Amino acid sequence: MNTKSKKKYSIKDLEKGMGKRTISGFLNSWRKGLGMSQNDFSKLLGISRSNLCDIEKKRKGVSPERAAKFAKILGYSVNILIEMAIEEQLALIGLKYKVILEPAA
C-alpha cells in the first residue's frame, strides 16, 4: 500500500480542518503533545501556571517578544510564533489580518 501523497497542503488547508492557527491553541496542543501539565509546562516557559491558563483560554494575549522567547525555549520557528501572536492580538480587537514576517535586510 502506498501511503505517500503527492498533494501539498497549505496553511489554508490545515486551518480548514483544524481551525484558525493561534498561539493559544499552539501552546495548548504543544503542551498536551508532550503530555505535560500546565504547571510543568509553565515552569518550562518561565511563566506562572495561571498565566499559561489565561493564555490557553484566550483571556490574555502573548506579546511578540514573549512569543519569540517561547519559540526559542521550544525549539520552534520564531517567525511563526510571532506571526500567530500578532494575528491573535489583531483578532481580539476585531481586525482580520494575515501577518507574514520577513527578515530585515
Image (cartoon, helix red, strand yellow):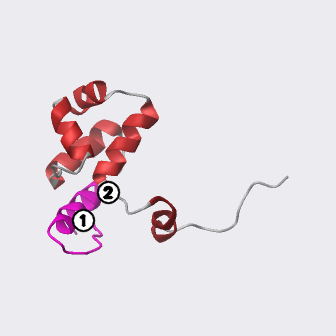
- Residue type (three-letter) at the residue carrying disc 1: Glu
Question: Is residue 92 or residue 81 the one in the foreground?
Answer: 92
Q: Is residue 46 visible?
A: no
Q: Is residue 45 visible?
A: yes
- How far apart are the alpha carbons under marks 2 and 1? 8 Å
- Secondary structure type for disc 1: helix
User: Residue tagged by mark 1?
Assistant: 87
Q: Which mark is residue 22?
A: 2
N-terminal of the pair, mark 2 or mark 1, is 2
Q: Is residue 35 above or below residue 13?
A: above
Q: Categorize mark 1 by other alpha carbons within 10 Å: few (<14), some (14-19), many (20+).
A: many
Residue 97 placed where, x, y %?
Answer: 26, 75
Residue 64 counted in the magenta span: no
Magenta segment, which residues? 78-105
- Secondary structure type for disc 2: loop
Instruction: Name the residue located 14 percent from the left edge and 69 percent from the top edge.
Output: 93
Question: Is residue 43 or residue 17 the one in the foreground?
Answer: 17
Instruction: Name the residue located 26 percent from the left edge and 65 percent from the top edge.
Output: 103
User: In this rendering, would 16 be left or right of 104?
Assistant: right
Instruction: Name the residue located 60 percent from the left edge and 67 percent from the top edge.
Output: 8
Image quarter (top left, top right, bottom left or bottom right) of the C terminus: bottom left
Asked if labels 1 and 2 touch by Cβ distance under 8 angstroms, the answer is yes
- Quadrant of the rendered structure where residue 29 is? top left
Q: Is residue 88 above or below residue 34?
A: below
Residue 34 placed where, x, y %?
Answer: 43, 31
